[in-house]
Image (cartoon, rainbow, N blue to C red):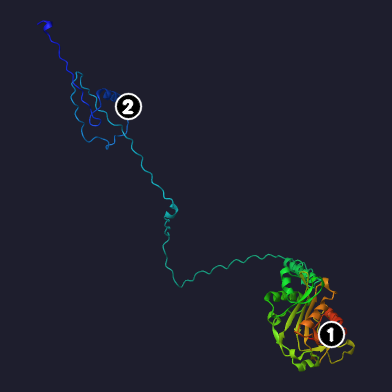
């Protein structure tokens, strides 16, 4: 057969079938490129993590459709999705208030077994408490411990700090007067019974006055009692009332009989205020009888002697034994050292005589002093104007 009679083979062409995106495999060219890249990536790795079984396909891939082509079929397996790394384990979250969720540790059990105890056995006595060691705070060098101030008359221990501070305070009040606040001076001015020059005045304080005024009067009387060595009068007795004597006891010297027998304050305090200090005080008392003072030249066996209030500062006074009527008693009278010999004590006596009984001025002969000191005796003689004939009463 000749070559001209040979026929050329027929070449047929067919349209390539379109592939879907999910069900079909990628084209051949793309599959080859991805296969080589996958081979390069997976070939050098020898210890790669195991494949997640959840990612594996459960169904076999579909058969490759027939392709009418002269090229031999490719043996490259289909590409697989990239391997997933295992997710890290979730960390437990600590509570915010973990302090309140702490579980207390159980106390360990005692190692020794409990022993039997008899009630007849007595427990050992407790040891006595340790006594504190005493420390000597003051040395006694056999010297002069107590000292008497020549100005204010107070006895104190100079080596004792508290005693020395108390003496300084008392000395200042005794010498310069008792301090008063400006507001308290204005309150005292409402009880004013006498007014002098330079803003000085005398205020009277009795049972019907306020507690603040009575307390201030008691404070001033403490200074007076300390200097005079007198006994402190209780507040219940100091701010009490009494009934006056009968007209027969007063005799003809009572200027107003209608006031006799009425109820009045037993004591009244008169304060002499100068600036913001109380520089003088007088405590007047309602009395009934008193004894006359006799002259030393006329003293006889029937004369009694009044004991002095202070042996160092007073002298004895001879008095008669027959009591006489009296109305006003001067229990205490005092003037600060810096303001003496200025007529303050005499002004206090005159004010008490004219103010003690309402609407009545008591005669001088009806006024008596209570156990006067040496300076008090000199004041009485000067005020009465005679050495004898005035009255003294014992409280």
* Residue with the mark numbered 1: 317
Q: Residue furthest right?
A: 297
Give the quadrant of the N terminus.
top left
Q: Residues within 10 Å of mark 1 (few under 14, many from 20)?
A: many
Does 60 appear above or below 110? Answer: above
- Provide residue 262's location: percent of width, then percent of height: 71, 89
Q: Quadrant of residue 255?
A: bottom right
Does 141 appear above or below 76? Answer: below
- Provide residue 287's location: percent of width, then percent of height: 76, 87
- Provide residue 315's location: percent of width, then percent of height: 84, 81
Q: Residue furthest front?
A: 359
Left or right, 168 with respect to 31, comes to right
* Residue 223 visible in the snapshot: yes
Q: In this orientation, which residue lies closer to the viewer: 337 or 371?
A: 337
Q: Specify which label sits upstream in the sequence, 2 or 1.
A: 2
Does 24 appear above or below 280? Answer: above
Q: In this orientation, which residue lies closer to the viewer: 279 or 313?
A: 279
* Residue 145 visible in the snapshot: no
Q: In this orientation, which residue lies closer to the viewer: 128 or 96?
A: 96
Give the CA separation, mark 2 to mark 1: 139 Å
Secondary structure at numbered mark 1:
strand
Left or right, 310 with respect to 83, comes to right
Picture mark count: 2
Give the quadrant of the C terminus.
bottom right
On residue 296, the disc is none
- Provide residue 190's location: percent of width, then percent of height: 73, 75
On residue 41, the disc is 2
Secondary structure at numbered mark 2:
helix
Q: Quadrant of residue 136?
A: bottom right
Left or right, 192 with respect to 43, comes to right
């Amino acid at each position: 057969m000749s070559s001209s009679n040979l026929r050329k083979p027929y070449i047929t062409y067919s349209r390539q079938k379109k592939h879907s995106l999910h069900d079909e495999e990628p084209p051949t060219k793309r599959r080859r490129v991805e296969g080589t890249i996958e081979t390069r990536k997976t070939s050098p790795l020898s210890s790669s993590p195991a494949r997640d079984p959840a990612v594996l396909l459960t169904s076999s891939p579909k058969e490759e459709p027939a392709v009418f082509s002269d090229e031999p079929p490719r043996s490259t397996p289909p590409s697989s999705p990239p391997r997933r790394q295992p997710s890290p384990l979730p960390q437990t979250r600590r509570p915010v208030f973990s302090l309140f969720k702490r579980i207390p540790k159980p106390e360990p059990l005692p190692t020794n077994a409990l022993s039997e105890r008899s009630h007849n056995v007595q427990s050992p006595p407790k040891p006595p408490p340790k006594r504190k060691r005493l420390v000597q705070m003051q040395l006694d060098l056999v010297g002069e411990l107590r000292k008497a101030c020549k100005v204010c008359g107070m006895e104190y221990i100079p080596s004792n700090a508290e005693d020395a501070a108390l003496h300084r305070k008392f000395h200042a009040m005794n010498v310069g007067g008792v301090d008063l606040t400006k507001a308290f001076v204005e309150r005292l001015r409402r009880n004013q019974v006498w007014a002098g020059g330079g803003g000085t005045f005398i205020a009277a304080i009795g049972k019907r006055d306020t507690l603040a005024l009575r307390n201030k009067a008691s404070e001033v009387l403490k200074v007076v009692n300390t200097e005079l060595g007198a006994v402190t009068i209780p507040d219940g007795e100091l701010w009490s009332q009494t009934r006056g004597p009968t007209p027969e006891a007063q005799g003809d010297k009572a200027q107003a009989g209608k006031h006799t027998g009425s109820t009045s304050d037993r004591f009244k305090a008169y304060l002499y205020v100068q600036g913001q200090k109380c520089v003088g005080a007088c405590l007047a008392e309602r009395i009934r009888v008193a004894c006359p003072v006799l002259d030393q030249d006329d003293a006889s066996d029937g004369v009694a002697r009044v004991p002095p209030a202070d042996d160092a500062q007073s002298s004895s006074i001879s008095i008669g034994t027959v009591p006489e009527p009296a109305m006003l008693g001067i229990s205490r009278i005092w003037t600060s050292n810096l303001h003496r010999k200025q007529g303050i004590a005499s002004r206090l006596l005159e004010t008490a005589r004219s103010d003690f009984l309402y609407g009545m001025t008591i005669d001088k002969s009806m006024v008596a002093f209570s156990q006067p000191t040496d300076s008090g005796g000199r004041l009485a003689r000067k005020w009465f104007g005679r050495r004898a004939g005035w009255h003294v009463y014992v409280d």
